[in-house]
Image (cartoon, grey):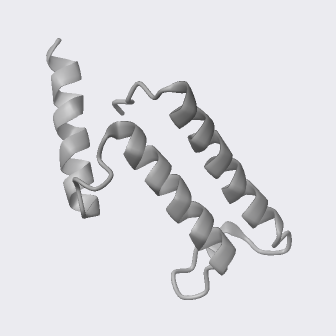
Amino acid sequence: MPWCNPTAEQKAKIEKTAQAILDARALYPDSSLADLYDELTMPPELRKAHQANDKAVMEAYGFWGKLNTESECVAELMKMYQRLTEK
């Protein structure tokens, strides 16, 4: 997986939002990951934490506001991967 070169500020934001995901999961100690990640019943604080993390990672890649769908992001990541493997 190609990784971007985040600034210190971006890295700190990604770390903070990743911790928020763990914190949201901890609110439901009796729930399995399958329960927590059910699309219909995902706890709102977990969904919000993931959305914040997605945004932080997308900003670090320079994708935020440029790529609008998951398939566009995957396509761009595959292009980056191809460039890495051609070296």
Numbered circles on residues, count: 0
Q: In which quadrant will I find the N terminus?
A: top left
* Of 44 and 8, the residue lying toward us: 8
Q: Quadrant of residue 26?
A: bottom right
Q: Position of residue 68 (x, y in %)?
A: 24, 63
Q: Who's the residue at 77% across and 74% down the image? A: 31
Q: Is residue 35 visible?
A: no
**Residue 28 horizontal/vertical position (percent):** 81, 73
Horizontal side, residue 56 vs residue 25: left or right: left
Could you tell whether 64 is left or right of 5 in the image? left
- The answer to whether residue 75 shows anywhere in this view is yes
Horizontally, residue 45 falls left or right of residue 57, namely right
Quarter of the rendering containing residue 55: bottom left
- Comparing 3 with 86, the one in front is 3
- Above or below — where is 79 with respect to 33? above
Residue 82 lies, in percent from the top left, at: 17, 29
Write down the quadrant of residue 23 in the picture. Answer: bottom right
Q: Residue at x 54, y 59 (%)?
A: 52
Q: Tell me what residue is drawn at x 65 percent, y 69 percent.
A: 46
69 relative to 75, above or below: below
Q: Residue at x 56, y 26 (%)?
A: 8
In the image, residue 77 sits, relative to residue 46, either above or below, namely: above
Q: Is residue 54 above or below residue 38?
A: above
Judging depth in this view, the residue of 3 and 16 nearest the camera is 16
View extreme (top): residue: 87
Q: Report whether 65 appears left or right of 86.
A: right
Q: Quadrant of the C terminus?
A: top left
